[in-house]
Amino acid sequence: MRIDVVTIFPEYLAPLDLSLIGKARAGGLLDVGVHDLRAWTHDVHRTVDDTPYGGGPGMVMRPEPWGEALDALVPGPASSGPRSEATRAERAGSRGQSERSEPAGRVPEGGVRLVVPTPAGEVFTQAMAHELAAESWLIFACGRYEGIDQRVLDHAATRMPVTEVSLGDYVLFGGEVAVLVMCEAIVRLLPGVLGNADSLAEESHTQGVLEAPVYTKPPEWRGHPVPEILRSGDHGRIARWRRDQALLRTAQRRPDLLATLDPGTLDKRDVAL
Ligand code: 6GU
């Protein structure tokens, strides 16, 4: 998979070099490019924002740098024109903090999807993480201020699928941290990234319920024992206990999840619970 991120704060994306995402990159499972939007500005102040039409507080991100950035990353119908120009712009000195590992304009098999983090988007879920993990190329466009001029998204949508995504019902300064969150959720689903595929099947949300509590040694710690059943060696009863705990937790903490649970995934004991 290839992931490109366009942002005015490339340093915010430094964690993509760390941990399992860094390992996936080192192992060739993932290719990441982080790009400074200001590389596609042409004024001396490298302006990326302007006042909103219609008035109101805050600033809106200007469409022109975004248009050039997307033209540079994705070869359009008239691919040689804007693409090579913007590639030059990107190469111009230290401005374009691009760490891309390949020349701009490569289209991996299967095309590209533009993902725009915004509190006005569709809520990000494990199901969406699976959908995005199936793409071969994602471009994340990080907005700041009051957001990106809507025409950037409307125009991009004539060239590629565009998804506006929210992490939840709260407001962040910008999309950068949301991209880190989404990249973790997506990259760990890529084949070969996690050592043990079983941990994917078992975990919270994959089965539509929260995971049961977990324990390790010692058997008693600060007066708190490990539930006896987990030390019994009876794998059937342990599986049943975990399932009960998962359903109980979900009912207490996330009744909204229980309500949408597919009845086909419930067994007779579940229903009795
Ligand atoms: Cl994806 N972006 C911003 N700026 N704020 C958010 C968000 C995203 N999700 C929740 N709040």
Image (cartoon, grey):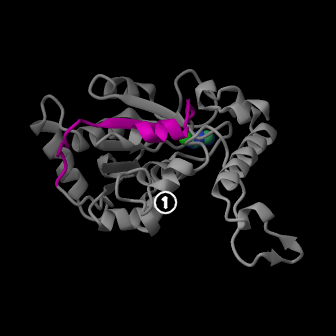
Q: For this rendering, which residue is in front, 125 or 232?
A: 232
Residue 129 drawn above or below residue 198: above
Query: Is residue 118 one of those drawn in magenta?
Result: yes
Label 1 sits on what residue type?
A: Tyr
Q: Residue at x 32, y 63 (%)?
A: 25
Q: Position of residue 105 (x, y in %)?
A: 18, 45
Q: Position of residue 82 (x, y in %)?
A: 17, 38
Residue 70 drawn above or below residue 242: above
Q: Position of residue 38 (x, y in %)?
A: 36, 51
**Image quadrant containing the C terminus:** top right
226 relative position to 174: left or right: right
> What range is drawn magenta here?
103-131
Q: Residues within 10 Å of mark 1 (few under 14, many from 20)?
A: some
Query: Is residue 105 one of those drawn in magenta?
Result: yes
Which element carries disc 1, helix, strand or loop? helix
The residue under label 1 is 12
Q: Residue at x 16, y 54 (%)?
A: 103
Residue 20 drawn above or below residue 43: below
154 relative position to 219: left or right: left
- Ligand 1 within 8 Å, label 1 CB: no
The quarter of the image that holds ligand 1 is top right
Residue that extends furthest to the right in the rendered view of this protein: 223
Q: Residue at x 18, y 42 (%)?
A: 107
- Quadrant of the rendered structure where residue 122 is? top right
Q: Quick check: can you spot residue 245?
A: yes
